[in-house]
Amino acid sequence: MLQVEHIETFYGQSQALFGVSFSVEMGEAVTLMGRNGMGKTTTLRSVMGLTPAAAGHIRFAGRELTAAAPHAIARAGIGYVPEGRRIFPTLSVLENLTATAAPGRAGGGTGWTLQRVFDMFPKLKERQRQMGALLSGGEQQMLAIGRALMTNPRLLILDEATEGLAPLVRREIWNCLEALKNDGLSILVVDKNIDALARLADRHLIMDKGRIVWSGTSEALEADPELGRRLLGV
Ligand code: ATP
């Protein structure tokens, strides 16, 4: 479904990605791991067209998205939950959910509505008239996920899915992602919780210095503690 081929991305003169290639198949959950500064966020931002790749190709559902603008990439069916949530602080929960919503997307939307988002995150329903800035970190993350779902994506991308959240809220987010996966949504996720990632995902990619240096299943990841020490700093 998503095919990333040999992308190279720069910040000015400084190269951050060196020929990154991977794919995410329909209904698959894939993780991107690696120590800080290895290129995970840059990879996700390149896919979303926010930090465009200078070379290589990005295709989604058969469409070439390499030079597409972020809004076109979102419209093509990729939902993005950025690091730090980036919700609209001065808009209400309701406005956050509806501002970028794309109901009834042509070509395979899964039919997300306000009601479905509220069923998944009842706290958002309770707080729907509150300003985004007044929510807790966990509620903001739920809002960021809900906002992405309201664009009716076929692939959901999350950067640092549970960073800075309390254990109970983390569990809620992981449960939500598992339910979304079981519902057939494709997921590409960055996080530091390797155990939760191994439970959720089918396949894992590890980045080191702007390259993907390892890929494998949860079993392969868990069977190799040296991998964690060498490439993940755990
Ligand atoms: P983290 O978990 O710390 O976010 P990461 O694996 O997501 O790490 P990136 O944020 O993609 O890594 O960073 C990859 C490289 O690009 C790093 O060397 C970083 O210093 C550099 N970099 C990231 N953002 C910028 C920027 N806005 N300007 C210049 N260099 C940047």
Image (cartoon, rainbow, N blue to C red):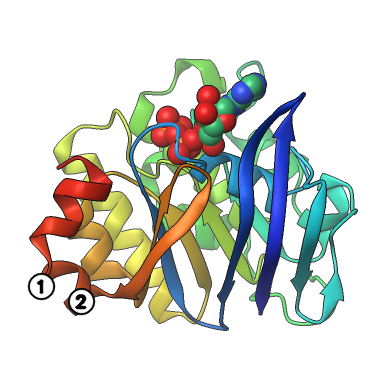
Q: Is mark 1 on a helix, strand or loop?
A: loop
Amino acid type at circle 1 is Ala
Crowd tier of the residue under label 1, counting other residues whose Cα lies within 10 Å: few below 14, some 14–19, many 20 or above: few
Mark 2: is the Cβ under 8 angstroms from ligand 1?
Answer: no
Q: Is 62 displayed left or right of 227 in the figure?
A: right
Q: Which of 230 and 158 lies nearest the eye of the viewer? A: 230
Identified at 47% across, 79% down, the residue is: 28
Amino acid type at circle 2 is Ala
Q: Is residue 103 above or below residue 216?
A: above
Residue 42 occupies quadrant: top right
Tag 1 near tag 2, CB within 8 Å: yes
> Looking at the rendered structure, which numbered label has been put on residue 220?
2
Q: Is 204 displayed left or right of 227 in the figure?
A: right
Picture coordinates of residue 147 (x, y %)? 61, 46
Q: Is mark 2 on a helix, strand or loop?
A: helix
State ligand 1's quadrant.
top right
Identified at 44% across, 56% down, the residue is: 189
| Quadrant of image for the C terminus | top left
> Looking at the rendered structure, which numbered label has been put on residue 223?
1
